[in-house]
Image (spheres, rainbow, N blue to C red):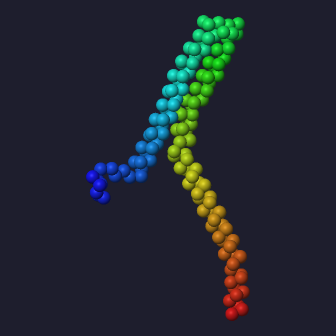
Amino acid sequence: MFSKNKKGTNIDLAQHEQIEYAQERIHQKKKLYRHFVFLLIGSVFLVLFNKILKYGETYDWALWIICFWSFLFVMHAVNVFVLKEFMGRNWERKQREILVQKQKDRIAEIQKEVEKDLAPTQIDKKKEL
């Protein structure tokens, strides 16, 4: 039980990343479905207040709120199903690699400049000796 040689749970890094990504996607979809349920329940209550309880009956304010809320739900769905796939993990990895390469290139340029500036001073020191 407390031995150092545990054979049960050896998960490599790639599998661990896949599991984390799957959990993240599940959480996003769960929040989207919860948003949809709240939209439906909230819409029913708004219509009840507006039409049946006759609160602000002269104007259909509930319809405007429901339309705006539906627009937000559509944006949420687009974010979960379209943008997360389009700008997902692979896109992030590619962008990270591009930025790291730019940093490496900039460091190499600075290093060349430093070596260029140091080279004449080192030659002068050798002449003095």
**What is the tally of numbered marks visible in this picture?**
0
**38, 111: nearer the viewer:** 38
Q: Position of residue 25 (x, y in %)?
A: 48, 37
Q: Foreground: 45 or 1?
A: 1
Q: Position of residue 42 (x, y in %)?
A: 57, 18
Q: Going 44% across and 40% down the picture, which residue do you hit?
A: 22
Vertical comparison of 31 with 86: above or below:
above
Residue 5 appears left or right of 94: left
Q: Residue at x 62, y 60 (%)?
A: 103
Split into 4 quadrants, where in the image is the C terminus?
A: bottom right
* Displayed quadrant of residue 120: bottom right
Q: Quadrant of residue 68?
A: top right
User: Where is 53 relative to 28, above or below?
Assistant: above
Query: Outermost residue toward the bottom?
Result: 129
- Identify the residue at horizontal 58%, vertical 26% (top origin): 73
Going 62% across and 7% down the picture, which residue do you hit? 53
Q: In the figure, 77 relative to 51: above or below?
A: below
Q: Is residue 121 left or right of residue 49?
A: right
Q: Residue 102 location in percent, x, y?
A: 62, 58
Q: Which residue is at the far front?
A: 2
Q: Is residue 128 left or right of residue 97?
A: right
